[in-house]
Image (spheres, rainbow, N blue to C red):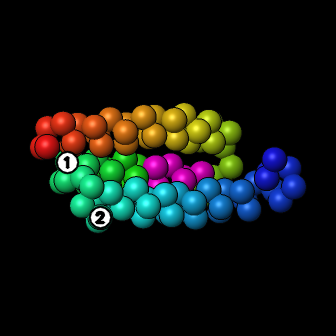
Amino acid sequence: MLPVTHGNKYTELHILLYTLILLAVSLLPFVTGMSGGIYLMGALALGLRFLQYAVRLLRGDDRQVALDTFKYSITYLMALFVVLLVDHFVFF
């Protein structure tokens, strides 16, 4: 809906901003002591990769990059939960 009302560049910028916020929020379980080092490394790796997709999306106007970013967002969420579970069951 947002690309229809505000255009692609506006939407891509917001995807980048929300990805930065998501990266910061995904580190909170480590900061608050809910998880350990495995989670921190996994969350950073996954989040930085997501950030890379968001930057690629902002720099270009390719529908394939947009589709790849969408696909990675689904993979990201699943992988983040897997890393959280591994961290919990391996070290607690």
In front here: 68 or 86?
A: 86
Q: Magenta stretch mostly in which secondary structure?
A: helix
Residue 38, disc? 1
Classify 56 as above or below 92: below
Viewer-proximal residue, 3 or 62? 3
| Three-letter code for the amino acid on which mark 1 is drawn | Ile
How many neighbours does mark 1 have within 10 angstroms: few (below 14), some (14-19), or many (20 or more)?
Answer: some
Quarter of the figure that contains the C terminus: top left
Of the image marks 2 and 1, the number of the one nearer the N terminus: 2
Outermost residue on the left side: it is 91
| Residue beneath the point at 54% across and 53% down | 54
Q: Which residue is mark 2?
A: 32
Rendering coords of residue 11 (x, y %): 71, 57
Residue 79: image location, x then y, percent: 37, 36
- Look at the image and say whether residue 17 sits in the magenta stretch: no
- Residue extent of the magenta highlight: 50-57
Q: Which one is nearer the viewer's eye here, 56 or 6?
A: 6
Would you say 83 lies left or right of 6 here? left
Does residue 43 appear left or right of residue 89 in this picture?
Answer: right
